[in-house]
Image: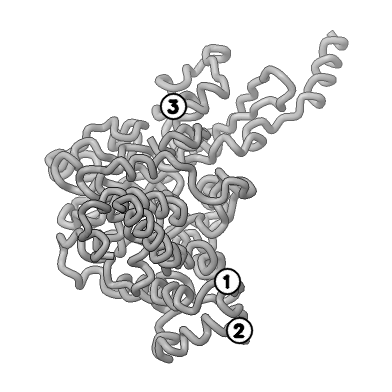
Amino acid sequence: MKLHSLITLSLAVSVLVTPALAQKSGKDVYGKTCAVCHATGIAGAPKYGNAGDWSPRIAGGTGRLYGSALKGTPKGMPAKGGNPSYSDAEVKAAVDYMLAAVKTAAKPTATPPQNPVAKEEPKPEPKVATSTPKVDKAEPTPTAAAAMAEAVPVGDVNAFNRLLKPLGKRNPPPPEDGIHDPANDGTHALLPPLTAYAGLPKSLAGNRVNWVEAIGTKKINPRWDRTDPKAEPVVMDLNIVREVKGSMPDVVYPHKQHTEWLDCSNCHPAIFVPQKGANAISMAAILLGEKCGVCHGKVAFPVSECRLCHSKKKDLARPAQAAASVAK
Amino acid sequence: MEKLYGMRKGGRLMACLMAVLAMLFVDLPEAHAEYGDVVINNYSDGAGMRPVIFPHWFHRVRFRCKVCHADIGFKFQAGGNEINMVKIIDGQYCGACHNGEIAWSVENCNLCHSAKPGTKTQVHESTIQKLARPATTPANK
């Protein structure tokens, strides 16, 4: 009898719980769909967290915003963000989520400091369902279930490029980025990276900003001295060519781009002995954060950009060498 | 749901069942912070503060690497500088600029101490961190 009642109970629970969990929170819907345009402001979409974009729309009333989100607008907003599988409540929750970001961003300093816990709560009901397991995890004594949840691979396992960062999740604003605490009032006062990157030359990796070009074209002019804005770097224009094993093109190391940012003492002599042939550099060492990897793969462009360093074709260098030896 | 929790005998089973269901339907929060963000948690957690997040990108727009890494003396190692608030107020490390003159001063605790509690010291998005590891181990170490 006991068993029977348990089974019916668990069945009842699964029936009750499943639709509630299947309902996505505003944040999830935003992350999966809305962020594609609203994170960056593509096609005139009001940008997430940008009060200037949102205030005229908020003035029209939340009801109208819901309507635009559900039915689309002639300006380019597709109905339900182009995903008709969302329920109306899910779409509205996503709108609420985006509105909440603007409202919190508008008054970051007005809120009293030291209020760490109870801030993320004022959000629509659908959130409750999905936030349950998070609450579970935040408990001081982690349950076995929470430990298991850590170990289970999530998301669509057969998704294309499963381990890469999806388009909508690049350069998110601090409250969204997964390491900043959204319950911290200071987090909402921080500058979203994309705001700073507007107008800077782009790249394919790292911050997705080409910092070298940004400084070369004077898009940014970071100080060379802590206090003196007029101090200029001592730029040294000397290329070092390293012949490498295998079929990869040889590495050309340009002092010029490095001395724009760094002092000689940053690299010499601790990381690189300033003497030809004295430095054993391997990609393994770089991947593990040594040699070039002290910066490249942490702040400077990462090792995925092979050809930025391996830039001197060998088949051009070899015949030249051969010709030189013949001439002798 | 409260009603179900109230039933003591089925409570544990129910919790397990719900946890399993939850895992099926809910994406775990993933970190997508900015490349080069440094989390420093040498002392913060122990002192009941949120760990510090240092945004490299924000600072490199304003200062060249040399200013902090040669003049001020930050080592190229996350968590390797043993920074504490006494040193900062004394004008060392962050305090060389965050003194109310070059940049805002130490009273804005929550602008730096802004990480989720328990976040480990790391260079976020670094190559080491991103080396693919088996799906059965936690992604961020």
Tell me how far mark 3 sits from mark 2, CA to CA. Answer: 52 Å
The vertical placement of A271 against A222, above or below, is: above
Tell me how far mark 1 sits from mark 3, CA to CA. Answer: 54 Å
Q: Residue A56 falls in which quadrant of the image?
A: bottom left
Q: Residue furthest bottom?
A: A60
User: What's the residue at 57%, 56% (across, down)?
Assistant: A167
The vertical placement of A11 against A53, above or below, is: above
Question: What residue would you read off at disc 3?
Answer: A267
Lower position in the chain sequence, tag 3 or tag 2 = 2
Amino acid type assigned to the residue bearing label 2 in the image: Lys
Residue A186 drawn at (x, y percent): 25, 60
Q: Which mark is residue A75?
A: 2
User: What's the residue at 51%, 55% (across, down)?
Assistant: A170
Question: What residue would you read off at disc 1?
Answer: A85
Give the crowd class for mark 3: few <14, some 14-19, many >=20 residues within 10 Å. some
Q: Residue A82 falls in which quadrant of the image?
A: bottom right
Q: Residue furthest top?
A: A328
Camera-side residue: A248 or A130?
A130
Lower position in the chain sequence, tag 1 or tag 2 = 2
Question: Is disc 1 placed on a helix, strand or loop?
Answer: loop
Give the crowd class for mark 1: few <14, some 14-19, many >=20 residues within 10 Å. few
Amino acid type assigned to the residue bearing label 1 in the image: Ser
